[in-house]
Image: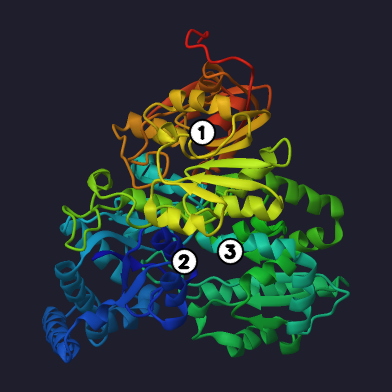
């Protein structure tokens, strides 16, 4: 069975749901990752996928044997360490000494065990399934690195979906890059990797699936704010200041052991100064799960040192999105919380510590995010709370920079589509008859089952194109009749005829619309079927023309049967798409089971060629709208009336106007056309 291996975190379950909705796959993951429990597996299963925890592939008792092996390896390392008599650590590194000693001796067994289990489970999975992709949320520590290196050793594509927007300088382990590609949240997050020498084409910008939630939260801001104030017992008359804690991952000597305490203390000192100045504010400290060793008790102790009573602030470990949307200012240190505040339209303040000077700058002077150190942290917070002009200036700066940090909503779908492009198809079809390569669809028996690449949903985006209420509709390529059924519901009395070659789909459609013809449009004998000349007033061509060998003849054959006020609505894929152009520049024109390069596409159209096509066959395009390609949402161009170069890395498009860029970012065009009284003119001007 075709499978992917996922080491995605729980917040990215939606990516897997989108992936299996279009590519029915088995999702394999270690325990503790997205989909490994019943609750997070359910959306994946409902979308048509299957889920398997990797550890369950190992025979009973095998994990105990691996644990014993890890113990022997750890004992060997401990012996070597003792024999070497490593020198004592200096006083400056004493806070790290115990951790390092423990890591190399007592804790090595518990570190080795999950990695040894993962590798063995992956080998079992590789023997049982055709693994087309490994996807991770990080590829530099522990399990993520192990999975990435295993994939590369077996020539399986591995993609790293960034777990954060990388803002500072890459250092020590972070300077490694094991995946074939890293999917970034925004162009800003690719900069440290490009500085490292990673090619731009290996750093596609797709957005953060976890940030997709903000759109709904922001739309309900007032309700969210009321609920947050109620839940945390806040003063409804006072603004809310949110502080997001940081932590020390302790992955290198550049980490500061007491970073957590230092940053919390600096913030609480600022709170005391603000309150002493008579500025009332609610304060919530949002802690990270990684800081469980500190917790509320540790914060209360720090608060007491700074003159803040324990009940003068609230402590939270969840509700990140709701807290940010409900806040008046968000304070954090070199954190993605500032970007989340940017998305939510809330002023963000970035606290600079000594570490920021070493590894930063994390935000630029023009990013709209206020930078503050110990000496001016209180003044910066007070300015946002009390000076409307200052606050609006901060928000304006953030709005101007948002697209640089975030590709926008719809990221989960974009990530899934991008992962599908990297996936390696198995070398041959499996015995169950499912195609391994897109081109094998061409030689399969057609019409016996529903095509998994197409969705049983009405094409309601075409309805706004109608110039009048349909009376008699011909839906060419009606599939299961979902569009025709929606037309009949919206326009009672409308008669809908469908043409569909897929027998299974046609059977479903026959129960939804008035009549279904299982033959090609070119082969339909309208007269023999009792269809009167001039009786069809609406034709629907939803992603049909590109599949026809001779769409010109098809359009001509329709003319005698169309009413004087006939309207033809069509959706047609856009071949002048930036991703297709970039793929060509990289030597790729890869056919897929569905999409712009659906393997069954025969004809290809650009916006201009769509107009030419209808003109030459005796129709006039009266309206055309563009359905944007969400994968290109982060591509920013010139304003209306201006032109600029578009740099795609491998190619540069010169002097692209605003309208041209919109066309280049279009997935497909939605078209309304009408007969123009001409019978078709193959000698029409180009």
Q: Residue at x 34, y 61 (%)?
A: 135
Which circle marks residue 527 in the picture?
Answer: 1
Q: In the rendered view, would you say 628 is above or below 392?
A: above
Q: Is residue 429 left or right of residue 44?
A: left
| SS for dot 3 | loop
The span from disc 1 to disc 3 (Cα, nearest Å) is 74 Å
Crowding at mark 1 (Cα within 10 Å: few <14, some 14-19, many 20+): few
Marks 2, 3: nearer the viewer: 2
Image coordinates for residue 502, horizontal then vertical, percent: 38, 50
Q: Marks 2 and 3, Cα distance to the nearest angstrom?
A: 24 Å
The residue that mark 2 highlights is: 12
What residue is disc 3 on?
333
Rendering colour mode: rainbow
Question: What whole-number distance in Å separates the C-alpha atoms at marks 2 and 1?
Answer: 55 Å
Label 1: state its secondary structure: loop
Q: Residues within 10 Å of mark 2 (few under 14, many from 20)?
A: many
Q: Nearer the viewer, residue 107 or 220?
A: 220
């Amino acid at each position: 069975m075709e499978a992917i291996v996922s080491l995605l975190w729980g917040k990215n379950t939606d990516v897997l749901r989108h992936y299996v909705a279009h590519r029915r796959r088995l999702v394999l993951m270690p325990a503790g990752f997205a989909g490994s429990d019943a609750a997070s597996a359910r959306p994946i299963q409902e979308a048509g996928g299957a889920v398997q925890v990797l550890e369950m592939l190992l025979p009973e008792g095998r994990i105990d044997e691996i644990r014993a092996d890890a113990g022997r390896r750890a004992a060997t390392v401990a012996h070597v360490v003792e024999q070497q008599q490593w020198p004592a650590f200096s006083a400056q590194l004493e806070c790290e000494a115990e951790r390092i000693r423990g890591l190399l001796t007592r804790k090595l067994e518990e570190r080795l065990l999950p990695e040894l289990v993962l590798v063995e489970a992956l080998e079992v999975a590789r023997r049982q399934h055709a693994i087309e992709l490994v996807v991770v949320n990080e590829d530099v520590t522990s399990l993520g690195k192990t999975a990435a290196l295993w994939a590369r050793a077996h020539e399986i594509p591995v993609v790293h979906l960034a777990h954060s927007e990388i803002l500072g300088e890459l250092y020590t382990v972070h300077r490694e890059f094991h995946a074939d590609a890293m999917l970034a949240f925004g162009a800003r997050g690719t900069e440290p990797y490009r500085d490292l020498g990673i090619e731009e084409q290996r750093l596609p910008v797709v957005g953060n699936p976890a940030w997709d939630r903000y759109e709904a939260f922001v739309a309900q801001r007032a309700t969210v704010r009321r609920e947050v104030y109620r839940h945390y017992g806040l003063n409804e008359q006072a603004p809310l200041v949110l502080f997001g804690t940081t932590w020390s991952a302790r992955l290198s000597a550049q980490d500061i052991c007491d970073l957590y305490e230092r940053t919390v203390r600096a913030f609480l000192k600022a709170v005391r100064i603000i309150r002493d100045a008579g500025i009332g504010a609610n304060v919530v400290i949002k802690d990270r799960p990684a800081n469980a060793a500190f917790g509320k008790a540790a914060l209360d102790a720090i608060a007491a040192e700074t003159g803040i009573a324990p009940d003068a602030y609230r402590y939270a470990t969840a509700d990140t999105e709701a807290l940010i949307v409900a806040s008046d200012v968000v304070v954090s240190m070199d954190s993605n919380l500032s970007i989340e505040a940017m998305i939510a339209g809330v002023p963000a303040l970035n606290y600079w510590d000594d570490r920021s000077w070493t590894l930063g700058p994390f935000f630029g002077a023009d990013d709209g995010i206020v930078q503050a150190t110990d000496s001016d942290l209180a003044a910066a917070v007070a300015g946002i709370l009390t000076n409307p002009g200052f606050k609006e200036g901060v928000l304006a700066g953030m709005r101007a920079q948002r697209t640089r940090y975030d590709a926008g909503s719809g990221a989960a779908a974009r990530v899934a589509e991008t992962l599908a492009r990297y996936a390696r198809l198995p070398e041959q079809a499996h015995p169950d008859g499912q195609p391994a390569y897109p081109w094998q669809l061409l030689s399969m028996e057609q019409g016996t089952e529903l095509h998994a690449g197409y969705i049983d949903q009405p094409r309601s985006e075409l309805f706004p194109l109608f110039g009048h209420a349909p009376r008699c509709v011909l839906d060419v390529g009606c599939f299961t009749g979902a569009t025709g059924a929606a037309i009949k519901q919206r326009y009672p009395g409308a008669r809908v005829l469908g043409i569909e070659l897929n027998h299974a789909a046609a059977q479903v459609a026959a129960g939804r619309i008035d009549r279904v013809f299982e033959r090609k449009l070119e082969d339909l004998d309208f007269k023999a079927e009792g269809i009167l000349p001039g009786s069809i007033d609406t034709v629907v061509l939803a992603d049909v023309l590109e599949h026809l060998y001779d769409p010109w003849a098809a359009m001509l054959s329709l003319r005698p049967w169309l009413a004087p006020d006939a309207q033809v609505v069509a959706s047609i894929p856009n071949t002048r798409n930036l991703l297709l152009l970039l793929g060509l520049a990289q030597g790729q024109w890869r056919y897929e089971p569905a999409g712009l390069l659906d393997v069954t596409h025969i004809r290809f159209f650009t916006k201009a060629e769509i107009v030419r096509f209808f003109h030459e066959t005796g129709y006039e395009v009266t309206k055309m709208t563009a359905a944007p390609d969400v994968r290109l949402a982060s591509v920013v161009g010139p304003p209306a009336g201006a032109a600029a170069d578009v740099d795609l890395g491998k190619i540069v498009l010169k002097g692209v106007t605003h309208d041209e860029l919109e066309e280049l970012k279009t997935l497909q065009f939605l078209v309304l056309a009408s007969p123009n009284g001409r019978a078709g003119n193959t000698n029409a001007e180009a």
